[in-house]
Image: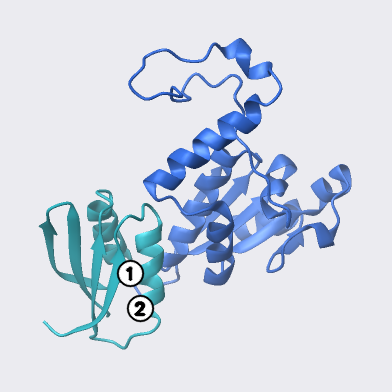
Amino acid sequence: MSEEKPKRIAIIALHGTLDLAYPPLILAGTAIAMDMEAAIFFTFYGLDILKKDLNLRVPPLANPAMPHPVPGIPMGVPNIIGVLPGMTAMATMMMKGWMNKAGVMPAEKLIQACIKGGVRMIACQMTMDVMGVKREDLIDGIEIGGAGTFLDYACDADVTLSF
Amino acid sequence: MNVAKVLDCKGMCCPEPILDIKNAMGTLKSGDVVELQATDAGSVNDMASWSKRTGNKILEQKQDGSVYVFYVQKK
């Protein structure tokens, strides 16, 4: 096990919502803990996960799996309500409350654990250009690259995932 | 059993116990035993997989009420 080349996981993080930020971070961080190598390529909305001013939210729309606000009462919020102002903040607050109760690490802490553990956190240069994101808008401990950077890494990966 | 370090991961959920034990491994020497206490029911399978992948051995594990206790020896 130890003498072999370490297993490697290459992940693409495409979305910038709170729920979709977790799986790539959890898997990459755990991979490092399991003596694997890991990289995440943050592209399009996924780039938001690397912002200094982290403000990940939960979309209240088009998500039939969202648990009911009051546990035990089998009546969900009609989807149309999700378009009202303040509903994104409400859904985010609810989700953060549930996560906190379950003992889930805050996203900021998980991001730092990934960086400290040695996950290669690659911000997509093209996305930065498209969205007008500057290097100083992003946290330290990351690198900037493009499709070539990711593919070079992914070519030697044992597992590749996209979220 | 001579326990070099105790990790209290009670109340934490995936992936924190695994991240914590990995960090603890970095502070110990080969042969040292760590006691990990967790309430995450998923940690039973996760610790078995972690042990298999990293080669650090689970010497003993038990359940004390809602707390799962693992004794892990650093390889």
Q: Where residue A92 is drawn, which disc sits there?
A: none
| Circles 1, 2 touching at the beta carbon (< 8 Å) | yes
Residue A110 in view: yes
What residue lies at 36% left-to-right and 62% top-to-bottom? B18
The colour chain B appears in is: cyan
Q: Is residue B71 above or below residue A151?
A: below
Q: Secondary structure at mark 2?
A: helix
Residue for point 46% across, 24% down = A69
Residue A116 in picture, x, y percent from top left: 56, 71
Could you tell me how far apart the alpha carbons at marks 1 and 2 are, in whole angstroms? 11 Å
The image shows residue A151 at horizontal and vertical percentages of 66, 54
Q: Report which quarter residue A21 is drawn in.
A: top right
| Mark linked to residue B25 | 2
Of residue B36 and residue A122, the one placed in the foreground of this image is B36
In this view, the residue in front, A35 or A148, is: A35
Q: Position of residue A5 (x, y in %)?
A: 45, 71
Residue in the image at 66% along x and 52% along y: A41
1 vs 2, front mark: 2
Q: Which residue is mark 1?
A: B54
Give above or below for A48 relative to A85. below
Callout 2 amino acid: Met
Locate residue B9: give its quadrant.
bottom left
The blue one among the chains is A
